[in-house]
């Protein structure tokens, strides 16, 4: 039998100097294998789409085969020809003749996956060429109001989407697919230690209420200065990184089985300061003593051991100040692509800037930031923990416990967040109201200080997927560490 005719996509001429990467023979061999044995389709269906074929006719044939097989029908040259234009001339062959030749010269089912991978890889290379050409053309003809930084971010966004193999293509999806993923999540939660559907924070009572940190959720952690919100965020982030475990899948990729890879945007504190705080917390030594060098030999040994352990954890810090939301998004995508990413922290919201279009309106700018962070959480499919300042109106009330209305500058924080947590330490406010020593009020004050000493409240002001309420934690101010209450001090959670 003579060789199959070499097809040339519409619009391509013999005089073309460089053709986009493709392998017409591989496409023909794969389609022929599927037409002979429909089982071959299932070997490539999870990664190969019609758009990955170079030739438009092959795209149409594969799309028709996929529709037939998925509807439980047989895909053969006879059933497929019905969906092709009978007047089509394919190198001197009719569609019926061409389909017959595909099936007649088919490769074996054993090779179908290899051919599919080859077709897929060539499609990715064509996409890379297109991204490169777009970069060159835009760079040559860029409008005045498009700075190079924005073009870099656009290119990184395109590369990230390509690297994620179409995971974020968007559009409608079958509800049955979503149901299947929900059941998988429930099964994993049932089998996981702690029975959590999300990533464990390392804090037992907080996990019970939140179910862990959920993928694609934006969680806002707010509080007044000195309440310990950065400490709590750091504790949670390091607990997650410390618990990181993975398994290697068949394709060589790492699948996280516990904990996670953490990215931490520290817009207020330097990486060195953050590292000192984490080492101090893990070694149970005051960071103040570390900065002064006021430690003895045994403490220095503990410090060295803690530092050695911390170096093994997948914890990445970006301490660049003055980032815009678009810059932060681009860097998070890059980390996900290069190192992996399971949990992201932003400290804190009000130090981010918008695109520059809303510089005169801080409320609109913050709306852009929170909307961008929520979109980033969905795109990367990771929990994003964003810290936020509270307005000063908290200080003017007798009851200093924060409320949703205290979120600074924009209602969009409450609107975009899946959960809003407030850190509150009544001990901090009470110690500044010490009565005159020796009085009856002073005795009551001391008793109240003893009751509140080392305790902090995490108030869940909003939770889209669960109850609101209050969780009480232990807080050691010397080493800035939040932990679970000891069993004898444990108070029931107040849920609403």
Image: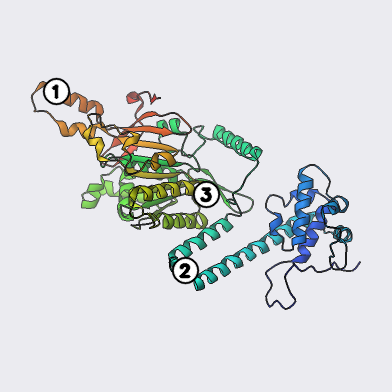
Above or below, comparing residue 410 to residue 163 in the picture: above
In three-dimensional space, the C-alpha distance between marks 2 and 3, rounded to whole angstroms, equals: 28 Å
Q: How many marks?
A: 3
Q: Earlier in the sequence, mark 2 or mark 1?
A: 2
Q: Which residue is mark 3?
A: 379
Q: Position of residue 313 (x, y in %)?
A: 43, 50
**Badge 3: how crowded within 10 Å, few (<14), some, or many (20+)?**
some
**Which residue is label 2 attached to?**
143
Q: Quadrant of residue 81?
A: bottom right
Q: Position of residue 325 (x, y in %)?
A: 41, 54
Count residues near mark 1 (Cα–Cα under 10 Å), then give few for <14, some for 14-19, many for 20+.
Answer: some
Whether residue 145 is visible, yes or no, is: yes
Identify whether 126 is placed above or below 278: below
**Name of the residue lying farthest toward the top:** 440
* Nearer mark to the viewer, of 2 and 1: 2
Q: Does the CB distance between marks 3 and 1 fall below 8 Å? A: no
Which mark is in front, 2 or 3?
2
In the rendered structure, the answer to whether residue 271 lies left or right of residue 453 reads: right
Q: Residue 6 occupies which quadrant of the picture?
A: bottom right
Q: How is the image coloured?
A: rainbow
N-terminal-most mark, 2 or 3: 2
Of 238 and 142, which appears nearest the observer? 142
Q: Nearer the viewer, mark 3 or mark 1?
A: 3
Q: Secondary structure at mark 2?
A: loop
Q: Secondary structure at mark 3?
A: helix
Q: Which residue is mark 1?
A: 443
x 76%, y 47%: residue: 67
Q: CA distance from mark 3 to mark 1?
A: 55 Å
């Amino acid at each position: 039998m003579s060789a199959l005719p070499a097809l040339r996509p519409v619009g391509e001429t013999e005089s073309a100097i460089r053709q986009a990467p493709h392998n017409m023979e591989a496409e023909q061999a794969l389609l022929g294998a599927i037409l002979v044995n429909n089982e071959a389709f299932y070997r490539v269906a999870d990664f190969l789409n019609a758009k990955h074929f170079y030739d438009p006719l092959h795209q149409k044939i594969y799309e028709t085969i996929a529709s037939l097989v998925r509807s439980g029908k047989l895909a053969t040259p006879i059933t497929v020809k019905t969906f092709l234009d009978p007047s089509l001339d394919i190198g001197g062959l009719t569609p019926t003749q061409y389909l017959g030749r595909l099936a007649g010269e088919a490769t074996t089912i054993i090779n179908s996956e290899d051919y599919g991978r080859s077709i897929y890889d060539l499609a990715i290379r064509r996409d890379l060429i297109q991204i490169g050409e777009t970069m060159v053309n835009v760079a040559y003809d860029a409008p005045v109001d498009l700075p190079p930084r924005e073009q870099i971010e656009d290119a990184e966004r395109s590369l990230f989407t390509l690297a994620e193999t179409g995971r974020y293509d968007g559009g409608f999806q079958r509800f049955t697919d979503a149901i299947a993923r929900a059941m998988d999540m429930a099964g994993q939660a049932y089998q996981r230690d702690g029975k959590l559907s999300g990533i464990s924070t390392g804090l037992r009572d907080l996990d019970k209420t939140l179910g862990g940190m959920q993928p694609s959720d934006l969680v806002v952690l707010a509080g007044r200065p000195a309440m310990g919100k950065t400490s709590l965020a750091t504790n949670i982030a390091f607990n997650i990184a410390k618990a990181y475990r993975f398994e290697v899948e068949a394709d060589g990729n790492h699948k996280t089985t516990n904990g996670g890879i953490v990215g931490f945007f520290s817009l207020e504190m330097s990486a060195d300061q953050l590292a000192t705080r984490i080492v101090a917390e893990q070694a149970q030594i005051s960071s103040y003593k570390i900065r002064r060098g006021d430690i003895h030999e045994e403490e220095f040994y503990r410090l060295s051991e803690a530092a050695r352990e911390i170096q093994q954890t997948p914890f990445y810090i970006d301490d660049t100040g003055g980032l815009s939301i678009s810059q932060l998004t681009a860097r998070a995508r890059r980390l996900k692509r290069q190192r992996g990413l399971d949990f992201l922290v932003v400290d804190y919201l009000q130090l981010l800037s918008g695109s520059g279009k809303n510089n005169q309106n801080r409320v609109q700018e913050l709306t852009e930031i929170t909307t961008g962070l929520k979109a980033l959480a969905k795109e990367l499919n990771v929990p994003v923990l964003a810290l936020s300042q509270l307005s000063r109106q908290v200080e003017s009330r007798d009851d200093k416990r924060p409320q949703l209305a205290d979120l600074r500058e924009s209602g969009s924080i409450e609107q975009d967040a899946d959960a809003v947590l407030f850190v509150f330490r009544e001990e901090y406010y009470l110690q500044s109201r010490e009565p005159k020593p020796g009085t009856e009020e002073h005795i009551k004050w001391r008793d109240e200080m003893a009751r509140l000493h080392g305790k902090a409240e995490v108030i869940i002001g909003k939770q889209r997927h669960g109850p609101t309420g209050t969780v009480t934690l232990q807080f050691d101010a010397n080493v800035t560490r939040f932990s679970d209450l000891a069993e004898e001090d444990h108070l029931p959670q107040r849920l609403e």
